[in-house]
Amino acid sequence: MSYILCLYVSARGKVSEKMENRESKSRQILLIRCSDKPGIIHAITGLLLQTGCNIVSNHEFVEPMDSIFFMRTEFFGLSPENELLSQIYALLPKDAEIKIYQEKRQKVVLFATKESHCLGDLLLRHRSGELDIDIPCVLSNHRELQSLVEDLHLPFHFIGHEGLTRETHESQILQFLGTFSFDYIVLAKYMRILSENFVTKFPEKIVNIHHSFLPAFVGASPYKQAYERGVKLIGATAHFVTSSLDEGPILAQDVVPVDHSFTKDKLVLNGRDIEKVVLARAIRFVLEHRVIVWKNKTVIFR
């Protein structure tokens, strides 16, 4: 009996030691994009092993038309980021783009205007812990949503645009954003077109959501136009914001079927539901560093 107990304690001790070693290392995410060539996976995983890293997840994809290699690897490691980056670059073609992210709780600024469905959904997901982020501020060019934000004990900041040029308004926003740190901006139905000057300051850092009728129904009343046309599907698209309006790399999309019995108001209601889900899904992809952009498209490792 005592011999069995000794074995049990010894086994537990080894397991505990392994767990302590793993917990002492930080969880990191490696993203790679480069021209394809034989042996890349073997070279990278071998290097991580040699430097004392433990791989817990690995996914690869080769784009067939341009022969571009993509890879996402999650690992626990102790190697300094700069040192590891230089070692990986030495193994890959010269066109390689590599990013290493430390797992951390990220800060996301939410932009909104008057529509509450996307903003409210994100705030509730944050409140419940489903969306594991910090929200340093909700920024809006109107005050309609201030009470919603403050009821959830989050900071609301108003920067009105009335009587201002777009450049002046954005200058005030940029000045405010410069007073704190953040990782991403999410446009939760922010109904203002951002200038190229603004967008280029945050490459692949701004996420937007809109209906998926584009380019068919352009303008202020897409659901009215969709109702008059008798559409049979409605949907939503989330994408990175670029200087080309609503044409940035797509992060997530979805649709729901509709029929002749749907009024315009019912189309709007269903459209808002799908917008909330798609935006939350896209944000999760971005926060978990599952996205690699290539030629205005995205490779997303799920």
Image: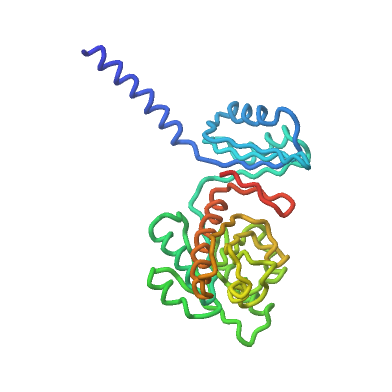
Above or below — where is 203 with respect to 47?
below
Above or below — where is 49 with respect to 65?
above
Q: Residue at x 58, y 48 (%)?
A: 289
Q: Is residue 167 left or right of residue 289?
A: right
Q: Residue 67, percent across and down?
A: 76, 39
Q: Residue at x 45, y 31 (%)?
A: 21
Q: Residue furthest bottom?
A: 163
Q: Residue furthest left?
A: 1
Q: Is residue 175 visible?
A: no
Nearest the viewer among 12 and 233 is: 233
Q: Is residue 229 left or right of residue 38?
A: left
Nearest the viewer among 65 and 202 is: 65
Quadrant of the image occupied by residue 217: bottom right
Q: Residue at x 58, y 68 (%)?
A: 177
Q: Residue 2, percent across and down?
A: 22, 13
Q: Is residue 4 left or right of residue 63?
A: left
Q: Residue 301, percent across and down?
A: 59, 44
